[in-house]
Image (cartoon, helix red, strand yellow):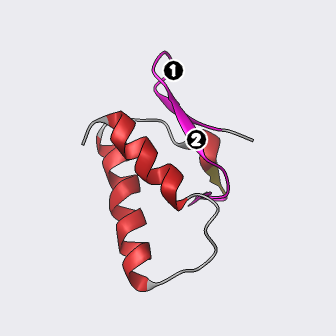
Amino acid sequence: MQIGQLVSEFNRQAGLNAWTSMRAYHNRALIDEFKNRGIDLSPITHDGNINFKHKVFYDLSTNKLIPLS
């Protein structure tokens, strides 16, 4: 997937409250792919956990995922 597609996939998961093991595996793979590409996730990380509360956009100039609040 291209980065834009990964961001769209992240945004589809943002704000959802229901959790299943399959969703957890999916989201873990998604986050791992962002990390493998060297994308900074610190703006959406709190206490070591990724926050799916808000949708994000990818800032190419800083190589970060930025939350839309």
Q: From the viewer's perspective, tell me whether residue 19 is left or right of residue 47.
A: left
Say which residue label 1 marks.
62
Q: Which of marks 1 and 2 is nearer the N terminus?
A: 2
Q: Is residue 42 above or below residue 62?
A: below
| Residue 38, horizontal then vertical, whole percent | 36, 35
Amino acid, disc 1: Thr
Circle count: 2
Amino acid, disc 2: Val
Say which residue label 2 marks.
56
Q: Residues within 10 Å of mark 1 (few under 14, many from 20)?
A: few
Image quarter where the C terminus lies is top right
Residue 67: image quadrant is top right
Q: Which residue is drawn at 62% across and 57% down?
A: 51
In what element is the residue under mark 1? loop
Q: How far apart are marks 1 and 2 (CA)?
A: 14 Å
Q: Is residue 17 above or below residue 59?
A: below
Q: Residue at x 67, y 58 (%)?
A: 53
Q: Give the range drawn in magenta.
A: 47-67
Q: How crowded is mark 2: few (under 14 residues within 10 Å), some or many (20 or more)?
A: many
**13 inside magenta stretch:** no
Q: Residue at x 41, y 84 (%)?
A: 21
Q: Which of 54/38 is in front?
A: 54
Q: From the viewer's perspective, tell me whether residue 19 is left or right of residue 2.
A: right
Residue 11's mark? Answer: none
Q: Which of 62/27 is in front?
A: 27
Q: Residue furthest left?
A: 1
Q: Mark 2 and mark 1 in contact (Cβ < 8 Å)?
A: no
